[in-house]
C-alpha cells in the first residue's frame, strides 16, 4: 500500500508501517515539512496514497473526502508516550484490512477502530 505519512506521525509508527511492506513516503523525509493540510491531501489524491496522520482535522470528510485519495487513517492517540502510542496503534492497525482503508476514513482510538465508508 502507498502511504503518505503526515509530519506529526511518530517515527516508530512509520518504521512499523514500513516493516509491514508498505511503501511509506514521510513528509519529513521528503523535505515537505510545513506544508498545509490541503497540500498533504492534494498530493495524496494526485498519487492515490493513503494518508496516515495524528491530525484530527483529517476526520472532516467534507473538507477531505477519503474517497478522492487512497483513504485516510487518523490515529487519535494524544498525550501519551511514544511507546504507548505505538503499542495502541499496532494493536488496532493489525486488525484492519486493506479494503477497510481504501477510499475510507479509519479512526484509531485507545478504545478501538471506527470505519466511515465512502459512498463512492
Image: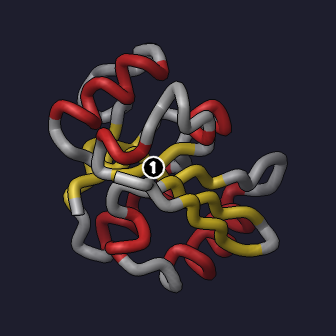
Q: Quadrant of residue 8?
A: top right
Q: Which residue is the site of mark 1?
A: 72
In the current view of this chain or complex, which residue is farthest to the front?
Answer: 119
Which quadrant holds residue 65?
top left
* Count of numbered badges drawn on the protein: 1
In the picture provided, is 89 more to the left or to the right than 35? right
Residue 113, by quadrant, is bottom right
Task: Assess disc 1: are there few (<14), some (14-19) or many (≥20) residues with their C-alpha within 10 Å of its C-alpha.
Answer: many
On screen, 10 above or below 41? below
User: Which residue lies at the image location 65% right of the left edge and 74% below the top edge?
Assistant: 87
Q: What SS does tag 1 mark?
A: strand
Please indicate whether residue 74 sits to the left or right of residue 36 in the image.
Answer: right
Q: Residue 32, position in %: x, y?
A: 32, 20
What residue is rendered at 63% in x and 31% in y? 57
Q: Nearer the viewer, residue 27 or 2?
A: 2
Q: Percent x, y for residue 82?
A: 68, 57
Most extreme residue toward the bottom, as rendered? 95
Residue at (30% x, 42% y) in the render: 69
Name the quadrant of the N terminus: bottom left
Question: Where's residue 107, x and y in %?
Answer: 62, 58
Horizontal and vertical percent position of residue 9: 53, 45
- Given residues 92 and 29, the one toward you in this image is 92
Amino acid at each position: 500500500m502507498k502511504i503518505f505519512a503526515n509530519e506529526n506521525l511518530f517515527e516508530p509508527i512509520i518504521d512499523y508501517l514500513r516493516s509491514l511492506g508498505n511503501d511509506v513516503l514521510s513528509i519529513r523525509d521528503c523535505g515537505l515539512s510545513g506544508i498545509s493540510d490541503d497540500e498533504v491531501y492534494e498530493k495524496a489524491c494526485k498519487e492515490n496514497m493513503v494518508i496516515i496522520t495524528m491530525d484530527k482535522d483529517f476526520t472532516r470528510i467534507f473538507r477531505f473526502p477519503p474517497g478522492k485519495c487512497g483513504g485516510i487513517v487518523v490515529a487519535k492517540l494524544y498525550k501519551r508516550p511514544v511507546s504507548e502510542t505505538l503499542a495502541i496503534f499496532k494493536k488496532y492497525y493489525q486488525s484492519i484490512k486493506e479494503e477497510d482503508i481504501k477510499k475510507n476514513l479509519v479512526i484509531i482510538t485507545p478504545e478501538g477502530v471506527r470505519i466511515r465508508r465512502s459512498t463512492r
